[in-house]
Amino acid sequence: MSTTGKTSLFQKLPSTDELLRHPQIQRLIESEGHVAVAESVRIVLSRLREEISDDRIDEKAVDLALGGFPAAVERQLRQMLSYSLRQVVNATGVILHTNLGRAPLAAYALDHVRNVGGAYSNLEFALAQGRRGQRDVHVDRLFQKLLANDNNNENIGTAAPGRPVEHNSGISHAISTIVISTIVVNNNAAAVLLALNSLAEGGEVVVSRGELVEIGGSFRIPEVMSKSNAILREVGTTNRTRIADYEKAINERTRLLLRVHRSNFEITGFTEQPGLDELVALARRRNVPVMEDLGSGALFDLRWVGIHGEPGVLDSLRAGVDIVTYSGDKLLGGPQAGLISGRADLVARMRSSSLFRALRVDKLTYAALEATLLSYVKGDYDTVPVLRMLRLPKEEIARRAEKIVIAVQSTARKSGSLGIELADGESVIGGGAAPSAVLPTRLIALTHAKLSADELNDQLRAATPPVIARVDEGRVLLDLRTVFPEQDANLGSQLASLA
């Protein structure tokens, strides 16, 4: 298009002020406010100017665009004022899906967040004494119940707040007693950083080469250690590290022995790794604390759901580990948080660090975490979505899936486009927990006569709410283990619309 032609098209465009006086746009201003509407007008006008400049629009198209300008402004306004962060249906079967927000919160946890967040609270106010308090107390009291002396609960372990926990140190069956304390920071990476900085700044931390892991988001143990101002002392090899390797590395500069959970992968074959009891026994002999980065950190026994070999927080503390760091939004089933549990004297050093204040969490996180922990104290595990999903039997998933398939098939047969059937499959935990463990499940498998599996998957993501599935061998697979039962009806409607 010639420069003259473009100029004539630009001249057709009204000014922002003129458009804001349009009756339909005036009504938008009355409902949504002048600022947001004016910004939408400017965006739509700018888009038209760009299309003219790039020769993507002619005179007829400009006239059509101007005729529909109020509607375009309204669409832009709705998009601008809508939430970007939104609910999705997780039909992947990955329970702790990092990209989908990891652990969903329990309904009562959300109620507690709403109650605390919508008003003032006693976050740092001791009501009984009428003076400033500590925000830790709201959850530390519950962690002490769950992580102190075993009471009558073999799977969780409960005790009165402040009671000591007995550990088998591994030395001639000697028993040591410590008081367990817990503090909260914003995620497990922060917990590791704070612990290393507080306990080993300027000194050496001994860790096996096979545990120098990188997990999602380029979180690397050596880099975190460098940021903490602790000095990494690698021992052993990638696949084999012996207790003697740790012992040889200990010197006057050693501040910690560190064990790191291998998130998202396993080393198999010609391997060797000392047990925690050996590591703790060595630490006791040489008077060096043991710290373990557990990553997911379960507060319940995973053997309940047929998963073996995955350590829990209580297992580590029972073994005599001095400090354990773990996540709040993984196997615990709560909000994003980094939890540090262990010897009260060591935890106190972290609490007094200026870094702790920089990494601490707010009232909403404490509210969600407190509510989640209360379910453990009460033994009400199925109210925690992650625990309920882990315990969900294949037979129950199959019943729900079959109901959806039968309903959709009655619609699909009319068009003949959508293929839908049931198939056996496996769910995974995700979030770096038990990377090789799987849970048997029943899948809904989809094919389409006119759409590829990827195109079918795209349409599911465009649904309201978006449905996130997985594609395998030319089929779209949906696993109801991670779909809430109240979402089944909507999911069935979305599938029927594809028929």
Image (tube, rainbow, N blue to C red):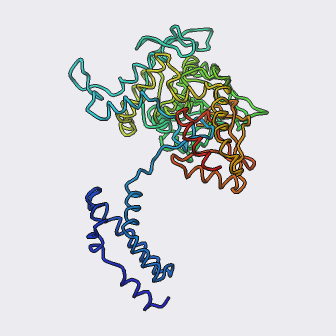
The furthest residue to the left = 130
List x then y, in percent, for residue 410: 67, 41
| Residue 64 image position (x, y, % from top left) | 44, 76
Point out the residue furthest to the right here: 270
- The answer to whether residue 201 is visible is no
Count every numbered label the image shows and give the total: 0
Between 410 and 24, the residue placed more toward the observer is 410
- Tell me if residue 454 can be seen: yes
Placement of 379 over or under 310, stated as above or below: above
Front-most of 194 and 10?
A: 10
- Could you say where residue 289 lies in the image, as x and y percent from the top left? 52, 24
- Residue 76, quarter of picture: bottom left
Answer left or right for 444 relative to 100. right
Q: Is 395 placed above or below 96 here?
A: above
Residue 277 drawn at (x, y percent): 63, 19
Of the pair 306 and 251, the residue shown nearer to us? 306
| Farthest front residue in view | 414
- Which quadrant would residue 420 be assigned to in this image? top right
Which residue is more in the foreground, 135 or 110?
Answer: 110
The residue lying at 45 percent from left, 35 percent from top is: 194
Image point (56%, 18%), residue name: 320
Decide if residue 95 is on the left or right side of residue 133: right
Q: Quadrant of residue 121?
A: top left
Q: Residue at x 38, y 35 (%)?
A: 361
